[in-house]
Image (cartoon, helix red, strand yellow):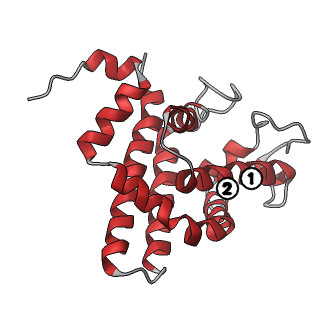
Amino acid sequence: MRKIDERRLETDLGYRFAYLAEFIGMGNDDIAAIHAAAPALAPLVPTIVDAIYDKLNTYDATWRHFVPRQHGYEGATPSSIEDLSMDHEQIQFRKKHLGRYVTALVTRDYDAKMISYLDMVGKMHTDKGGAKEIDVPLVQMNALMGFLSDALTGIILGLGLPREDEVRTLRAFGKLLWVQNDLITRHYQAE
């Protein structure tokens, strides 16, 4: 039986990632499967981003989080949810960020820098990072991650990959998104 330093899981991001990856069974073969999917998935990133934003725009509980100024955005902000259209500059700004995130998932090495990036994705949606006015409830983050997971599953199933590659790719993304979900939810724990 391996001994795990549970306190270190909360303070050492690399240790936490390594533990999660090992426990879930996410290894180099999974990362290779994710990277192998990049040529097919990368051209679909704009479609994925549009689908996510169409879904976010369906609910006031998700769309309202795009009214406050987003970290790094310097243009005009909407005054209310009613003033926030899909073609608003702030939405275009956020869509670019989401596109870079999805692209990073399939192209970047899963090194310390990437692990920090995945962790920052969780933190920036709370009042602990990014804009202090933005504090997206965990239920909304879970809904978003569930939608992204399903979207990726649908796309992978539609790629026409040989069955063995399809299964490997689906499982790899499933593991990755569970790790990402942990790196989101950890920032919602009471201190």
Q: Is residue 113 above or below residue 151?
A: above
Q: Which mark is residue 99?
A: 2
Tally of numbered tags: 2
Q: Indicate the position of residue 142 as horizontal and vertical percent values.
A: 45, 48
Residue at figure coordinates x 54%, y 56% from the top left = 106
Give the answer, above or below, for where 77 lies relative to 171: above
Q: Residue at x 69, y 66 (%)?
A: 46
**Residue closest to the eye, 51 or 98:** 98
Residue that sits furthest to the right in the current view: 76
Q: Residues within 10 Å of mark 2 (few under 14, many from 20)?
A: some
C-alpha separation, residue under disc 1 versus residue under disc 2 = 5 Å
Q: Amino acid at mark 2?
A: Gly
Q: 50 or 161: nearer the eye?
A: 161
Disc 1 and disc 2 in contact, CB within 8 angstroms: yes
Judge left or right: residue 20 versus residue 117: left
Where is residue 89? Give x, y as percent: 86, 51
- Badge 1, how many Cα within 10 Å: few under 14, some, many 20+? few
Q: Is residue 174 visible?
A: no
Pick the front one: 130 or 41? 41
Residue 121: quadrant of the picture: top right
User: For the point 81% across and 47% down, which residue is it?
Assistant: 90
- Residue drawn 31% across the image and 38% down it: 20
Q: Which residue is mark 1?
A: 96
Quarter of the picture containing the C terminus is top left
Image quadrant holding the N terminus, namely top left
Name the kind of residue labelled 1 in the image: Lys
Q: Secondary structure under badge 1?
A: helix
Check the image and name the residue furthest to the left.
1
161 in relation to 39, above or below: below
Viewer can see residue 143:
yes
Residue 77: x and y, percent?
A: 86, 41
